[in-house]
Amino acid sequence: MKTLKARNHERGFILLAVYMAAIFICLFSTVLFARHQVAVQATERYQNRILAFNAAEAGIDSALSGLAATNSTLRGTPPTDTTPSTNLIFQTPYYSFNNTTNTFGFKITYVPGRSDLRRIDAKGCAPDCTNTSRADQTSDIAVYSRITAGSPPPSLFMYGIYAKDRISMSGNAVFDSYNSNYGAYGGSNKSTDGTMAVNSTQTGQLGLSGNAKINGNVLVGYGGGSSVVTTSGNAKVTGTRSNLPQAWSNPDTVTAPEGATAISLSVSGNNTLTLPAGTYSASSISISGNAKIVTSGVVKIYVSGSISISGNGILVTNNHPANLLLYSTGSSSVSISGNGSFYGGVYAPNSAVTTSGNGDFFGAMISKTYTQSGNGSIHYDLAMNAVPGTVDLNQTEIVRIKAWQEMNSLAWGTGQTIT
């Protein structure tokens, strides 16, 4: 009987032990989960910190490119007062990188008493600048830069085709782009990044008919509406439509530089003319029959009269359009025809330019009016955007970095005085 009584006193012990074990397991799991959550958030914060820092540096690079380029808006004109009421020159909205939510923004300010200095403050955010993410991170970088040279001249060929008054395309022509620095046109070296522009606000001044297609963007004169671009048949524009800047001005007339070699460029029959690298001046260009001109190196030709290129045309070194630049210094017509492809840049701001036949045009063009007929297409060489010069990508000659500091870091406040 005593044994049975002892056993009755032990009733419920196992259940209690199970409860205690379950409570211990739950507490352990909760602590482990919380620790895991903290580790995950710490990892996310670390990753976003790196992304935010890189985004801030992208903002600095963007500002430096603007200071070194032709956009004087970013440089501003330093006030004569050494303690201006506002130092702000320019401030961007926040930009997002392609296919990501990481963003950056920057502002540029004057440095009182130093007309050659500009301060850049860039902020990078990851995953965005809304401060709503559990692992949101920001990075702030301040840079003092010194402007050491004037703005470089603007790019000569910012657009694939530019016309002051009118553009007309027909037939099966296609406008698109590529980059000759990456090889020949075709395959993966084809893009829709090019732009065709006409500085007109009148209806129908950029007209497409037949199967003509612009695989790229279109710009019309400031204030011009959608009626400036007209299409008929199967013609279409695949890219965006917008306006030229309000301050845009038509390209200037050029003259042949001193020292240009005078030459006759009338070639016919089966003749071939070889032109070594150099700068030339001619009263006209005429190529007909089976004749051709063969260039070596970079050739620039300034022409005061008409330009007529047919036959076998001009053979350009490595088929690189920047190796042949034709400048029309007057208002005579420019005609490129035949079945052979043309590689080069045509600068004829006061001329009526026409391309016809089945040969393609590779390069870029500036004209008063441009008319395309036939089946030849236009392929804008994005590398032509560097003619006649390009901004130093390292900013070493135009804008020099004098001081760089990541703000709110352990090293903040340890910099030296800017001289």
Image: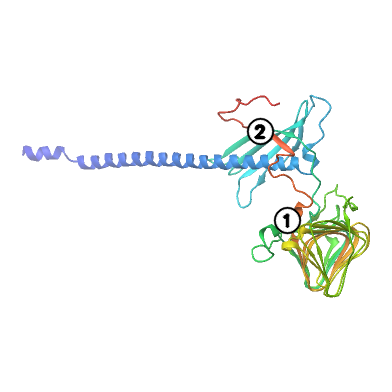
Q: Earlier in the sequence, mark 2 or mark 1?
A: 2
Within 10 Å of disc 2 (Cα), the crowding (few <14, some 14-19, many 20+) is: many
Taking 35 as reference, is 158 above or below it? below
SS at badge 2? strand
What residue lies at 74% left-to-right and 45% top-to-bottom? 391
Amino acid on which disc 2 is placed = Ala
Q: Position of residue 413 (x, y in %)?
A: 61, 25
Image quadrant occupied by the N terminus: top left
Q: Is residue 226 left or right of residue 38?
A: right
Rounded to the nearest whole Å, what is the CA distance between mark 2 and mark 1? 33 Å
Mark 2 lies on residue: 142
Within 10 Å of disc 1 (Cα), the crowding (few <14, some 14-19, many 20+) is: many
What residue lies at 74% left-to-right and 42% top-to-bottom? 66
Q: Is residue 417 left or right of residue 32?
A: right
Circle 2/circle 1 CB separation < 8 Å:
no
The quarter holding residue 160 reads bottom right
Mark 1 lies on residue: 383
Nearer to us: label 2 or label 1: 1
In this rendered view, identify the residue nearer to me: 237 or 369.
369
SS at badge 1? helix
What residue lies at 93% left-to-right and 59% top-to-bottom? 304
In this rendered view, identify the residue nearer to me: 247 or 321.
321
What residue lies at 65% left-to-right and 47% top-to-bottom? 96
Image quadrant occupied by the C terminus: top right
Amino acid on which disc 1 is placed = Ala
Taking 284 as reference, is 134 above or below it? above
- Residue 179 appears in the rendering: no
Q: Position of residue 264 (x, y in %)?
A: 90, 63
Q: Is residue 296 left or right of residue 60?
A: right
Instruction: Please name the colour scheme applied to the rendered image.
Output: rainbow
